Amino acid sequence: MISSTPIAAPPALLSADGLVGVIFLVMIGVTIIGGLIACNSERLVRAVAGLIVCFVGVAGLYYFLNSPFVAMMQVLIYVGAVAVTISFAIMLAAPEEQKKIGVSGPLIGPFGFGTAALIAGGFSVLAVRTEWPVIAKINDGSIKKIGIQLLTNYSMVFELISIVLLIAIIGALVIARVERKN
Amino acid sequence: MSLTLLNVIFAVVVAIAFAAANAAYLVWAERRGAARIQRRPGPNINGPFGLLQPPLDGIKLMAKQLIIPGGADKVLFIAAPVLAMYPAIMSFVTIPFSDTIVAHNINVGILMIFAFASTGSMSLIFAGWSSRNKYSMMSAVRAVSQSVAYEIPMLITTITVVMIAGSMDLMEIVHQQSRSILHWNIFPLLGNSHNILMPASFLIFFICTLAETNRAPFDLGEAESELVAGFHTEYGSMGFGLFFMGEYANIVIGACMTTILFLGGWSCPFGLFPGVWWFLLKLYLLIATFIWIRWTFPRTTIYGLLNLSWKILIPLSLVNLLLTAGLIKVF
């Protein structure tokens, strides 16, 4: 199934492959722009909007990578549930309050730039030097196949995720209890 | 220009045109229906039966100035009405109207439609928040709690249907129901389910569709007797027009999903005149029911709304899910 092929010449822009490439680049751009908005906006609701843009971009990348199921789950859970819950929390807390959130922490300045440069450089070197294998489609991505895989080959991951969720629920309860006593 | 690109452009244009035309003319149908129920003529001046009213209203709305209130968040204020319209248009990509009339059938069609439908409430949140208006804000909070509450029974009911069909492919779900009228998922005895609670399932799904599209008696988001006009208080001109059209486009999607999941899609009873018109007939009958319910039921309170979902619909749909699972295992 695994074969490594050299990168061919770039396809024409208006052919099917070329358009797919354009969409791929657009999705990467959307993800990065969304992330930047989420990090740099002063208003919390705008940050949520940026986060949503970022999630949609990631969903587009999943769709591009032949897994529509994961893409749709990304939109359903992250945009439809997580982002809505975050904005609900913001509205219930204090919508009028807009503190200017300054950038702070020990990694600001030269250390931050150094770390970022190291990570970016390392990833670039890895991306260029690695011989990327081209993997054929494993299965048709249908729900049945994904379900069988989840409950056989990846049942450990599946169970661990449910434990993570359980811990999250218990943690939320503990925090709520402490607040109530005060 | 390659053929693929032309196909894509054609599908996009048809989807947008269908959504927009339906939205415009359902406004006319709603106003005529409301007038009939309230014993008054309704819009009947422009064109035969007032049929020229929607395009004229559109021109009027587009000619008006879009006023952005001072202190509003401009970007989100403009983005919100656009977001109101897009989930419906995206959903038309995968809705099959007949065996051949579908833009792009994907094997997780149900998931795609619910994924985009769940993002629809973001438009209400952004509109309510960016308007800088207390009424809009309260409306946004209500809209979120409502959409969170009603998404749960809706998705549980959908899972029941998916379990019966064994697929998330909308085409496949219709094919399973098209053997005879008694194989439709709403009927309990024949078909794959044997579950006597399927009509209740259909009712739960229909009520959730009403609530998710913010229709009366569940239109707490824009309760005009309490919140002026809710999230679109500050919107004029085409901003308001887009919210209005988005509501009707979402109604069409909700009715399409009800038709596909429970009423057998385009399959025809007793083999009479098979074709796409059966789908359209079921679709517009459901939409007529939407309009009928809106003008005959009074609005509930926000507590009544949340109680209905959390105390009645969710337990009932869970029971139905368990019963269906058990019956599938037994038969």
Image (cartoon, grey):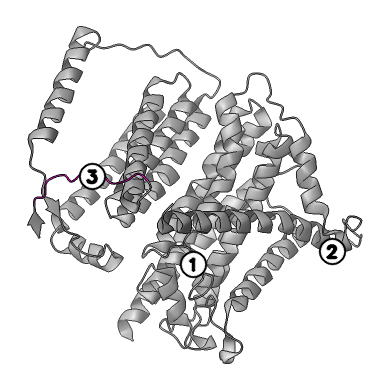
Q: Position of residue A181 (x, y in %)?
A: 38, 28
**Which residues, given as a range, are shown in magenta?**
A4-13
| Residue ID for mark 2 | B37
Q: Chain of mark 2?
A: B
* Residue at (57, 51) in percent of width and height: B306
| Residue ID for mark 3 | A164
CB contact under 8 Å: marks 1 and 3: no
The answer to whether residue B313 is above or below residue B323 is above
Secondary structure category for the residue under label 3: helix
Q: Chain of mark 1?
A: B
Respond whether the residues carrying marks 1 and 3 are from the same subunit.
no
Could you give the CA–CA distance between mark 2 and mark 1, rounded to whole angstroms?
36 Å
Secondary structure category for the residue under label 2: helix
Q: Earlier in the sequence, mark 2 or mark 1?
A: 2
Tell me the mark number nearer the camera, choosing from 2 and 1.
Answer: 1
| Residue ID for mark 1 | B102
Tell me the mark number nearer the camera, choosing from 2 and 3.
Answer: 2
Q: Position of residue B191 (x, y in %)?
A: 44, 85
* Residue at (78, 43) in percent of width and height: B59
Could you give the CA–CA distance between mark 2 and mark 3, rounded to whole angstroms?
54 Å
Instruction: Please check the rendered image and state whether residue A8 is part of the magenta-colored stretch, yes or no.
Output: yes
Disc 3 packing (10 Å; few <14; some 14–19; many ≥20): few
Tell me the mark number nearer the camera, choosing from 1 and 3.
Answer: 1
The answer to whether residue B169 is above or below residue B248 is below
Q: Amino acid at mark 1?
A: Val
